[in-house]
Image (tube, grey):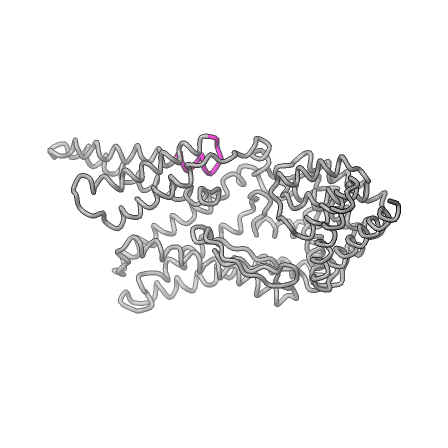
């Protein structure tokens, strides 16, 4: 429901702009035509559009900012869509036109999306969602309006395209359904080109693809095998992501920067090429095809520039922010290179005990909060655990808990399995392990994964339930044995062996 609400959020924004344009333009026209006998009636109708713009704008803003009033405004805007769609039919008794059918569908979807009462994010979650971290090249204000900026960049491009179509005499699509479908397909095509640019340059730079997401189509490597998932929500939000890791333990920084730059660069190239063809081809040429090349080109340039803006949404940095971090040096460049090194452990023999702990600790000294600060301390925890340095591992665990305590809202539930295992095995603290298990469960982690079963086994062992501990260990070990021969998975098998030794010792002592 949250994803559906976020999709409708931008529909509300577009509707507010349309209603505002109709309302203000028509009100001004009615004022300057006082001799028209229908002007007063028209003025009331157009004033209704102006008032509707306020409702849709409020629904957009409150939903975007996850305000407590978002549900009420969302329901009001959806009900208004239903009214605007049904009113012509009720008054004229004629079947609805295509545009009104779309509005009716949006109203129904909005009622379904906003009817349930969802748990609103807490104050801490809101505070940390757009908070920039020291030295990360982002700013709180830009982070807050980043999505608005990305959305707003498409409007000048769209209005330029509409004007160009009219001036050039290029015929457009008449059906609202076809225009909506074509717009989504163009965004899907631009996103595909962007992600393919990341993937192609990354592979050319000696990296390996691990995740490739475009709209509803999602490919991931799970337990060493490629899996495919179709996510319907991607039809409304045709975004994308590329997960790519170094295929060697040492990746030159310029290669990483090249991979990050490639997405926006390919959008700039393909967008410019499409615009040149559209502007040079005759209006009757098949190349024009309802002006789709021109719209593709204009939106490609707008979205490429948007991706190069430095901003952060939740815990994800834009390409522009990541590039600046790598170019600037310092703690954030160390963090980016540490992430690349840890990523390579999924496809090479590099284990946590082989990590560049100096780089990790140097980055951790400069990044003391947020998900990134937590990851660095968990990397250090795994390093010391793999080296058999329990005292140092306990110190890294304490630091990780401190970071979590300062920013719990940005930490996903999956990471909390590490705290359960570490408190059980490293500290031998049953109460703390149980507390972390309860936090993990409330965070909706990925159930029945290797980490989940291993954490459950460690918890049951430290609490003295050996039967339950052995059952969970068998499940975690079975998954670990299926994983490919790579350093990260060797560490998983090593942790399973450590836990198995403890279970065997407890059985012998019983």
Q: Quadrant of residue 24?
A: top left
Task: Write the residue at 27% across / 55% down.
Answer: 175
Labels in figure, total: 0
Residues 169 and 96: in front is 96
Identity of the residue furthest to the right in this view: 509
Q: Quadrant of the C terminus?
A: top right
Does the magenta portion include 182? no
Q: What segment carries the magenta color?
A: 58-68
**Picture coordinates of residue 266 (x, y %)?**
51, 62
Residue in view at x 31 percent, y 48 percent? 102
Residue 263 visible in image:
no
Q: Residue 193 placed where, x, y %? A: 49, 62
Residue 59 falls inside the magenta stretch:
yes
Instruction: Say which residue appears at 43% left-offset and 61% top-offset.
Output: 272
Q: Is residue 1 left or right of residue 244?
A: left
- Name the dominant secondary structure of the magenta segment: helix
């Amino acid at each position: 429901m949250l994803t559906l609400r976020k999709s409708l959020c931008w529909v509300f924004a577009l509707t507010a702009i349309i209603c505002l344009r109709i309302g203000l333009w028509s009100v001004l026209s009615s004022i300057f035509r006082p001799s028209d006998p229908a002007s007063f009636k028209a003025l009331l109708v157009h004033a209704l559009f102006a008032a509707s713009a306020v409702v849709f704008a409020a629904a957009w803003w409150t939903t975007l900012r996850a305000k407590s009033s978002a549900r009420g405004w969302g329901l009001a805007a959806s009900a208004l869509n239903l009214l605007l769609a049904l009113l012509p039919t009720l008054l004229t008794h004629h079947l609805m036109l295509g545009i009104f059918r779309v509005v009716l569908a949006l109203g129904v979807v909005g009622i379904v999306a906003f009817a349930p009462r969802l748990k609103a994010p807490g104050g801490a979650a809101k505070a940390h969602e757009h908070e920039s971290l020291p030295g990360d090249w982002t700013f709180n204000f830009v982070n807050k309006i980043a999505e608005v900026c990305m959305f707003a960049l498409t409007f000048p491009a769209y209005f330029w395209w509409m004007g160009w179509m009219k001036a050039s005499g290029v015929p457009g699509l008449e059906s609202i359904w076809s225009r909506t479908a074509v717009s989504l397909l163009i965004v899907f095509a631009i996103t595909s080109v962007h992600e393919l640019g990341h993937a192609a340059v990354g592979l050319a730079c000696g990296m390996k693809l691990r995740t490739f997401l475009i709209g509803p189509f999602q490919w991931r490597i799970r337990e060493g095998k490629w899996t495919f998932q179709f996510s319907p929500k991607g039809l409304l939000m045709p975004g994308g992501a590329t997960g790519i890791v170094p295929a060697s333990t040492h990746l030159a920084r310029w290669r990483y920067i090249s991979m990050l730059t490639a997405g926006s660069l390919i959008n700039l190239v393909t967008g410019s090429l499409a615009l040149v063809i559209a502007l040079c081809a005759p209006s009757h040429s098949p190349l024009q095809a309802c002006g789709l090349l021109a719209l593709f080109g204009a939106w490609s340039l707008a979205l490429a520039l948007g991706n190069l803006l430095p901003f952060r949404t939740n815990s994800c940095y834009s390409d522009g922010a990541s590039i600046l971090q790598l170019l600037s040096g310092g703690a954030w460049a160390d963090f980016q290179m540490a992430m690349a090194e840890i990523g390579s452990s999924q496809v090479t023999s590099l284990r946590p005990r082989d990590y560049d702990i100096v780089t990790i600790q140097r980055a951790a000294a400069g990044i003391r909060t947020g998900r990134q600060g937590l990851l660095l301390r968990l990397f250090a925890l795994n390093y010391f655990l793999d080296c058999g340095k329990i005292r140092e591992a306990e110190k890294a665990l304490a630091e990780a808990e401190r970071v979590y305590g300062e920013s719990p809202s940005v930490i996903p539930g999956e990471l909390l399995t590490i705290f359960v295992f570490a408190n059980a095995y490293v500290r031998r603290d049953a109460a703390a392990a149980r507390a972390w298990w309860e936090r993990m469960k409330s965070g909706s982690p990925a159930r029945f994964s290797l980490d989940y079963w291993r954490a459950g086994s460690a918890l049951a062992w430290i609490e003295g339930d050996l039967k339950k501990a052995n059952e969970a260990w068998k499940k975690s070990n079975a998954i670990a044995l299926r994983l490919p021969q790579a350093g990260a998975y060797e560490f998983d098998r090593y942790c399973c062996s450590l836990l198995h030794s403890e279970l065997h010792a407890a059985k012998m002592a019983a």
